[in-house]
């Protein structure tokens, strides 16, 4: 049973369409990540689910209730805001206890819950402070605590980890994952950090300019992107896109000097058609396969591996992973890739399978 | 402050501070000095030092005591009603509507109007025979009221005029504070299950507290010093029923020509005002208070 259904939701501010016919089904207990570049409407969608932003059209169903016209108070969701949205005049403890107070919980139970949540988030020593006496990361943890202290139908997180340092972020990411596995509550999580998306999500919804580009598991988005935007957005460094032309017979692509066998595609492409050949940097370091020669520009060393930035004879820039050696500026190296690892897109960026 | 000595801008601000300090200290001392004499324009040139006589006279003067009480009453009522009314209007208007700009401009009108015009207008409105106020009462089937002529009512009639003139000021300032306050905490409270009145009571009002306190201070100071409306609408009458301490000081100086006593009243008023406002200030802005 779907716990959250977003059906054909649209929203615009004046002439600007911020959400355009968005539909997402979220299963009970699953972890869904809304992923997309800044300004694509992630927060707007989350606010719409919470009932803080009226939508122009469409339906939102939580559990078995149509909540489209219900106020936020009656939707029984907990939300962590991008701006923390702590109550500035209340102490940390009062902030976390506020949702319990609104539900009329007695003082003793409420205090116990607050302390338990504070322990979990390591903010126990801060309980007596006011929000303005906290660092950004501490505020964010208080905001998370205020959501966790309740037992809602649905958790909404709006980039809850964006202001934390790397260590704390990894730690809290694991904490959220653990929490999700233990309480099995439906969570909708907004981020533009794909590492977070890939590690946390059961399902990722990729948004671009208010439109859904693709919905799928982390692996399917990485392996089987529907379009060039998703292919480029998922994976770091991003996928390389090379101009290519379909050769006579439709079974080979010419990309610069290289000929790539595309007989595995289900679609027969007519000769002479211009397409884009997508290859991920990590797939350019094979032992055999099609070769490309790369004039090295910079090499980034990351310890176990390196990323080489350089230029092909065709003038296109390419990033390639390099596991064995670290070529220097000015060297020309040979890259090898397997045709099966490439992804082909048409001129509009749609995937050709 | 540690860097003040090395800050080159001190050459600009220090002389000004010195001048202002000298001027105000000198004036204050001069006023105190006169209040310790029995300077009266009726007996010019024959004044002598009388010590604290003027101050003792004040506390034994029933007219002064009544005026002091009236000042306290008027200030408290004006401040409380204006803040409460202004806040209510702001919370009620707290949504974007088409005429917002127009309403805001209209709100400025009473503030800009000179007190003379406001006072005269209200005097006409409150005229027992031809005034609008009694006409409205008669429409509602209520008996006529002598707004400014009744000693029991006159103070409240002036109060109504003051509220009419200054509530818009409260509205404007609180509206500005509301607009610069973050809206996400309000949304967070809604998600957390608060009803609209709970959002206002637990989240919004505490956030506006500072702005409200400042507006209240300004209004309180202005009400204590209120003079113009009283002068134009009632001249302290009838039967001294609208005579505030400020007005009594004016009468003492310019009707009775009792300059020393008038200045003693002014000093006492100043001391009372300062004590009251400092108390109010420390209650509203506790040292560990939130921003
Ligand atoms: N009140 C508003 N009026 C007009 N436009 C708005 C308003 N709120 C948001 N927008 C626009 O809607 C679009 C989506 O905004 P939204 O906050 O949902 O982006 P986002 O995906 O959360 O971005 P980020 O990752 O930066 O938080 C943006 O282009 C923004 O400019
Ligand atoms: Mg956002």
Image (tube, helix red, strand yellow):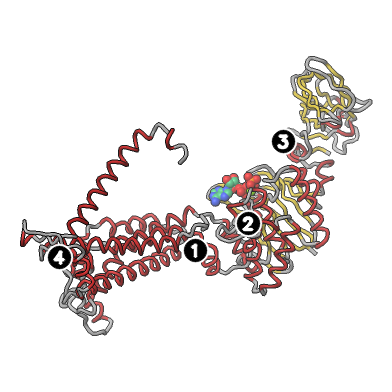
Residue at the spot of label 1: B205
Disc on the earlier residue, 1 or 4: 1
Mark 1 to mark 2 CA distance (whole Å): 24 Å
Q: Quadrant of residue B141?
A: bottom left
Secondary structure beneath disc 4? Answer: helix
Q: Who's the residue at 76% across and 54% down the image? A: A32
SS type, badge 1? helix
- Left or right of A135 in this view: A306: right
State if disc 2 and disc 1 touch (CB < 8 Å): no
Whole-number angstrom distance, CA of label 1 to CA of label 3: 53 Å
> Nearer the viewer's eye, disc 1 or disc 2?
1
Q: Residue furthest top?
A: A330
Question: Which of the two marks, 4 or 3, is nearer to us in this view?
Answer: 4
Q: Are marks 1 and 2 on the same chain?
A: no
Whole-angstrom CA distance, mark 1 to mark 4, is 43 Å
Q: Chain of mark 4?
A: B
3D distance between C-alphas at marks 4 and 3: 90 Å
- Describe residue A100's horizontal placement relative to residue B195 as left or right: right
Answer yes or no: are tags 2 and 4 on the same subunit: no
Q: Quadrant of residue A300?
A: top right
Mark 4 residue crowding within 10 angstroms, few (<14) / some (14–19) / many (20+)? some
Q: Are marks 3 and 2 in contact (CB under 8 Å)?
A: no
The residue tagged 2 is: A47
Question: Is residue B219 positioned above or below A311 on the image?
Answer: below
Asked whether mark 2 lies closer than 8 Å to ligand 1, one says: yes
Identify the residue under disc 3: A348
Query: Where does residue A38 sit, x and y in percent of width and height?
Result: 64, 43
Front residue of B224 and A209: B224
């Amino acid at each position: 049973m779907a716990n959250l259904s977003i059906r054909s939701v649209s929203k615009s501010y004046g002439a600007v369409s911020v959400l355009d016919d968005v539909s997402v089904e979220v299963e009970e207990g699953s972890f869904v990540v809304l992923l997309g570049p800044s300004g694509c409407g992630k927060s707007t969608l989350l606010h719409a689910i919470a009932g803080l932003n009226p939508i122009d059209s469409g339906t939102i169903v939580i559990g078995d209730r149509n909540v489209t016209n219900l106020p936020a108070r009656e939707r029984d969701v907990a939300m962590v805001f991008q701006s923390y949205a702590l109550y500035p005049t209340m102490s940390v403890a009062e902030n976390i206890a506020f949702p319990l107070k609104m539900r009329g919980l007695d003082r003793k139970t409420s205090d116990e819950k607050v302390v338990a949540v504070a322990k979990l988030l390591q903010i126990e020593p801060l309980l007596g402070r006011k929000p303005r006496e906290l660092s950004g990361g501490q505020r964010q943890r208080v905001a998370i605590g205020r959501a966790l202290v309740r037992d809602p139908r649905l958790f909404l997180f709006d980039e809850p980890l964006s202001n934390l340092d790397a260590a704390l972020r990894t730690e809290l990411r694991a904490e959220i994952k653990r929490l999700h596995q233990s309480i099995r509550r439906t969570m909708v999580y907004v981020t533009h950090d794909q590492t977070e998306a890939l590690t946390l999500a059961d399902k990722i919804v990729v948004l671009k300019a208010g439109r859904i580009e693709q919905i799928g598991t982390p692996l399917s988005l990485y392996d089987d992107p529907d379009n060039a935007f998703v292919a480029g957005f998922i994976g770091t460094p991003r996928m390389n896109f090379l101009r290519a032309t379909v050769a006579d017979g439709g079974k080979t692509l010419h990309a610069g000097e290289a000929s790539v066998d595309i007989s595995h595609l289900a679609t027969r492409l007519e000769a002479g058609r211009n397409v884009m050949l997508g290859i991920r940097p990590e797939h350019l370091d094979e032992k055999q396969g099609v070769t490309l020669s790369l004039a090295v520009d910079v090499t980034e060393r990351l310890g176990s591996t390196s990323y080489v930035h350089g230029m092909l004879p065709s003038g296109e820039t390419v990033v390639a992973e390099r596991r064995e050696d670290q070529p220097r500026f000015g060297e020309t190296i040979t890259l090898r890739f397997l045709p099966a690892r490439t992804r082909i897109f048409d001129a509009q960026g749609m995937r050709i399978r | 402050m540690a860097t003040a000595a090395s800050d080159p801008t001190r050459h600009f601000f220090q002389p000004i501070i010195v001048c202002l300090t000298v001027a105000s200290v000198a004036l204050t001392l001069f006023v105190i000095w006169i209040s310790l004499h029995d300077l009266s324009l009726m007996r010019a040139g024959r004044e002598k030092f009388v010590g604290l006589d003027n101050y003792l006279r004040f506390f034994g003067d029933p007219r002064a005591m009544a005026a002091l009480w009236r000042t306290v009453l008027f200030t408290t009522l004006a401040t409380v009603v204006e803040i409460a009314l202004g806040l209510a209007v702001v919370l009620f208007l707290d949504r974007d509507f088409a005429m917002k700009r127009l309403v805001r401009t209209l709100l400025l009108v009473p503030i800009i109007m000179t007190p003379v015009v406001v006072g005269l207008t209200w005097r006409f409105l409150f005229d027992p025979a031809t005034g609008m106020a009694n006409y409205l009462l008669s429409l509602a089937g209520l008996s006529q009221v002598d707004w400014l002529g009744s000693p029991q009512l006159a103070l409240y009639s002036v109060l109504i005029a003051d509220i009419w003139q200054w509530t818009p000021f409260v509205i404007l300032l609180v509206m500005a504070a509301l607009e610069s306050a973050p809206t996400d905490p309000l949304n967070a409270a809604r998600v957390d299950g608060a009803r609209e009145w709970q959002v206002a009571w637990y989240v919004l009002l505490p956030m506006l507290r500072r702005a409200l306190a400042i507006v209240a201070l300004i209004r309180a100071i202005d009400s204590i010093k209120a003079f113009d409306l009283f002068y134009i609408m009632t001249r302290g009458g009838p039967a001294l029923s609208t005579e505030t301490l400020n007005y009594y000081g004016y009468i003492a100086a310019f009707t009775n020509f009792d300059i020393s006593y008038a200045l003693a009243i002014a000093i006492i008023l100043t001391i009372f005002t300062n004590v009251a406002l400092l108390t109010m200030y420390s209650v509203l802005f506790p040292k560990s208070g939130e921003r």
